[in-house]
């Protein structure tokens, strides 16, 4: 199965460097332009299904990229829940204890850890494998965290994996074979 993973277009928090989490930001003008460029890249490509995170920025991106598609909104591909961790940059969050824990499901600040993200994304991918044929082509319009989880599941990971090396840019299509 081929998964095409698109990260939403640029948002105000992408400009400031503050992690947005599950906030309902809209796209910037540049984010709209990025989605319009992705629309041109994708063209008339057929997907067996298009899944979208419930956040406003992903919904806007989806509506621009494939306006005629019947989207399936799935909260399992939503951005990471930040709990009480608001107004931090990603570099600050990477330094926090348990941020990328593979054991704990929540940090002391009630933020989702990498372990909990892996669980929900693995559950989502397992459902895809059950519902679609092996040669299906699925489009996800989601967030960097979800793409990082898929990357880790596909490539393998352990307590020594440096997840900060993986970066999914706004307007980038990452292809995974699961």
Image (tube, rainbow, N blue to C red):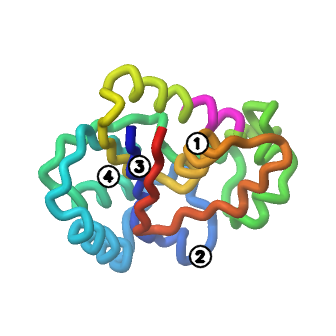
Earlier-in-chain disc, 2 versus 4: 2
Q: Secondary structure at mark 1?
A: helix
Find the magenta span and give its range. Answer: 115-120
Classify residue 172 by image quadrant: bottom left
Q: Is residue 158 left or right of residue 86?
A: right
Identify the residue position indicated by label 1 in the image. 154
Quarter of the figure with residue 60: bottom left
What number is the disc on residue 164?
Answer: none
Marks 2/3: CA–CA distance: 19 Å
Q: Looking at the image, which is closer to me, 5 or 84? A: 5
Residue found at x 78% / y 64%: 92
Disc 3: which residue: 55
Look at the numbered discs 3 and 4 and tell me whether their residues touch, using CB distance below 8 Å. Answer: yes
Q: CA distance from mark 2 to mark 1?
A: 31 Å
Say few, some or many: other residues with alpha carbon within 10 Å of mark 2 (under 14 / 14 to 19 / 20 or more). few
Is disc 2 in contact with disc 1, using a CB cutoff of under 8 Å?
no
Badge 4 is on which residue?
59
Q: Quadrant of residue 93?
A: bottom right
Q: Earlier in the sequence, mark 2 or mark 3?
A: 2
């Amino acid at each position: 199965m081929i998964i095409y993973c698109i990260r939403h277009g640029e948002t105000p928090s992408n400009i400031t460097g503050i992690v947005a989490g599950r906030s309902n930001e809209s796209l910037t003008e540049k984010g709209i332009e990025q989605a319009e460029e992705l629309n041109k890249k994708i063209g008339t490509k057929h997907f067996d299904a298009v899944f979208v995170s419930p956040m406003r920025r992903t919904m806007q991106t989806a509506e621009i990229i494939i306006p005629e598609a019947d989207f399936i909104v799935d909260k399992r591909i939503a951005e990471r829940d930040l709990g009480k961790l608001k107004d931090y940059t990603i570099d600050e969050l990477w330094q926090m204890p348990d941020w990328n824990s593979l054991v704990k499901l929540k940090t002391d600040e009630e933020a989702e850890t990498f372990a909990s993200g892996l669980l929900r994304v693995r559950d989502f991918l397992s459902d895809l494998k059950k519902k679609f044929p092996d040669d299906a082509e699925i489009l996800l319009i989601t967030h960097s965290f979800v793409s990082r989880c898929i990357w880790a599941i596909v490539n393998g990971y352990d307590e020594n994996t440096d997840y900060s090396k993986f970066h999914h840019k706004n307007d980038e299509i990452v292809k995974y074979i699961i």
